[in-house]
Image (spheres, rainbow, N blue to C red):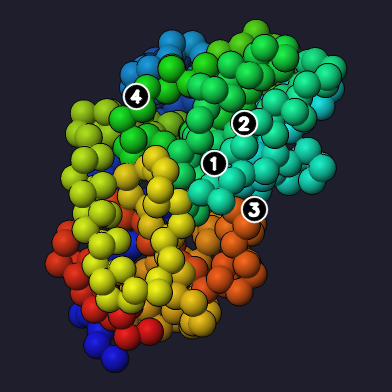
């Protein structure tokens, strides 16, 4: 089998390469002394850098800086909102779409998972039928874009419906920034969550946005940092790196270029194998994600062969800690176990070039 000399990274939904400028900012931040809670000059300097970062993240998202609470990433942000609302008694029930990331979905009773259609979009009629007659207040969680298929969800419609029934909405936006030009403020959600490492920032830092006055019990109790919503000395370098990545993402949109490459890739895949199946292609998706099955060839086999040939892709979600099991997302879309077990996710980004993708297709065609 042909191989490439250089590694070709096609797994941007798992994590993205750090922007070189962010790497410089991080190494400077690691070299500076001071706790942001201290009154002295050193402390104030770190506090200033954290607040600058909050400002940059707020500009990327389009919300007031005061509504942003930094966390250790998307998982903690989702968990804080879901558990925090339940623990405070602000909501008495939780629902979610059947395709949420496990950091949301695993908090919700499977009976309260709202189905999606075979294109991967939440079924609004079913949502309406389930919520009708529910006793508010409750929380409905729906992600902006699915990490496995890239399918965008009709968040505005979900928010309108949920608010009509007196509920609150959490929208996991982790896969959104840099991959869609959508305006996050137009979503109408009460809580939004983000993660730095999906936008060229460091791993282990993210945030949630509170557009709601609802009582949210903090997960971490202690020094009262982050407006008493998330105690613990701030991960100052991480937050500063997140701010730098947000600035670069906001200033340099590549959405059109990336979706052009994705479309070219999908056309080439279908030319190479006419029985290949690309999921969610008929509906709006973020710009960079292709989930494709080769019926009869297991995901594991594809992954290993591609890895040996120099390509990093994933089967389903990399957040499932290296284990390959049938994707709950594809199964929720009505895809059979067999076909779901033959799908891989290709997610591209800023550094991806057409020659890289051409090489990928050449090797994928031989699987
Ligand atoms: N939500 C979605 C949609 C994700 O794709 C991920 C990670 O891939 C997360 C949440 C978790 O984010 P983090 O890795 O920052 O914990």
Judge by depth and name the residue closer to the eye, 320 or 365.
365
Q: Nearer the viewer, mark 4 or mark 2?
A: 2
Q: Residue at x 25, y 40 (%)?
A: 255
The first of marks 2 and 3 along the sequence is 2
User: Is label 1 in contact with label 3 (beta carbons under 8 Å)?
Assistant: no
Q: Residues within 10 Å of mark 1 (few under 14, many from 20)?
A: many
Q: Which residue has dot 4 on it?
A: 60
- Distance CA(mark 1)–CA(mark 2): 9 Å
Of callouts 1 and 3, the N-terminal one: 1
Q: Does label 3 point to a residue whose CB lies under 8 Å from ligand 1?
A: no
Task: Give the Cα separation between the discs numbered 1 and 3.
Answer: 10 Å
Residue 126 falls in image quadrant: top right
Secondary structure under tag 2 reads helix
SS of the residue under disc 3: helix
**In the drawing, what numbered circle is on residue 332?**
3
Distance Cα–Cα, label 3 vs label 4: 32 Å
Q: Quadrant of the C terminus?
A: bottom left
**Residue, disc 2:** 124
Task: Give the camera-side residue of 240 and 144.
Answer: 144
Residue drawn 54% across the image and 22% down it: 157
Q: Quadrant of residue 163?
A: top right
- Spot occupied by residue 289 in the image (x, y as percentages of width and height): 38, 53
Mark 3, other Cα within 10 Å: few <14 / some 14–19 / many ≥20: many
Q: Residue under circle 1?
A: 121
Is 230 rendered above or below residue 97?
A: above
What is the distance, in whole Å, between disc 2 and disc 3 at their CAs?
15 Å
Residue reaching furthest to the bottom: 1
The residues bearing labels 4 and 2 have C-alpha atoms spaced at a distance of 29 Å
Mark 2: C-beta under 8 Å from nearest atom of ligand 1: no
Q: Position of residue 135 (x, y in %)?
A: 84, 17
Residue 271, how many percent across, how many down? 26, 71
Tell me, yes or no, if residue 197 can be seen here.
no
């Amino acid at each position: 089998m042909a191989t490439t000399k250089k590694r070709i990274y096609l797994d941007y939904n798992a994590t993205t390469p750090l922007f070189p400028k962010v790497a410089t900012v991080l190494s400077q931040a690691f070299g500076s002394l001071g706790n942001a809670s201290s009154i002295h000059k050193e402390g104030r300097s770190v506090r200033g850098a954290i607040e600058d970062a909050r400002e940059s993240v707020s500009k990327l998202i389009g919300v007031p800086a005061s509504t942003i609470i930094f966390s250790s990433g998307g998982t903690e942000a989702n968990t804080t909102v879901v558990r925090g609302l339940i623990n405070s008694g602000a909501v008495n029930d939780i629902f979610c779409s059947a395709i949420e990331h496990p950091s949301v979905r695993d908090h919700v009773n499977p009976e309260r998972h709202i189905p999606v259609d075979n294109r991967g979009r939440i079924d609004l009629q079913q949502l309406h039928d389930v919520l009708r007659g529910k006793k508010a207040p409750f929380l409905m969680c729906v992600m902006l874009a699915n990490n496995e298929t890239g399918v965008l969800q009709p968040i505005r419609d979900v928010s309108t419906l949920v608010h009509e029934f007196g509920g609150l909405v959490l929208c996991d936006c982790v896969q959104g920034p840099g991959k869609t030009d959508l305006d996050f403020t137009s979503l109408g959600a009460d809580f939004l969550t983000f993660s730095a490492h999906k936008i060229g920032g460091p791993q282990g830092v993210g945030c949630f946005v509170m557009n709601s006055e609802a009582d949210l019990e903090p997960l971490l109790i202690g020094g009262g940092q982050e407006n008493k919503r998330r105690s613990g000395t701030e991960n100052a370098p991480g937050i500063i790196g997140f701010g730098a990545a947000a600035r670069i993402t906001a200033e340099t949109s590549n959405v059109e270029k990336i979706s052009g490459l994705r479309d070219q890739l999908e056309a080439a895949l279908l030319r190479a194998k006419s029985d290949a199946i690309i999921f969610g292609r008929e509906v709006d998706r973020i710009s960079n994600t292709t989930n494709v099955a080769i019926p009869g060839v297991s995901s594991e086999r594809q992954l290993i062969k591609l890895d040996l040939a120099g390509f990093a892709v994933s089967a389903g979600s990399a957040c499932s800690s290296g284990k390959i099991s049938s994707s709950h997302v594809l199964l929720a879309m009505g895809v059979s176990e067999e076909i779901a077990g033959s799908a891989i996710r290709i997610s591209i980004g800023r550094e991806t070039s057409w020659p890289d993708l051409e090489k990928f297709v050449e090797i994928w065609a031989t699987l």
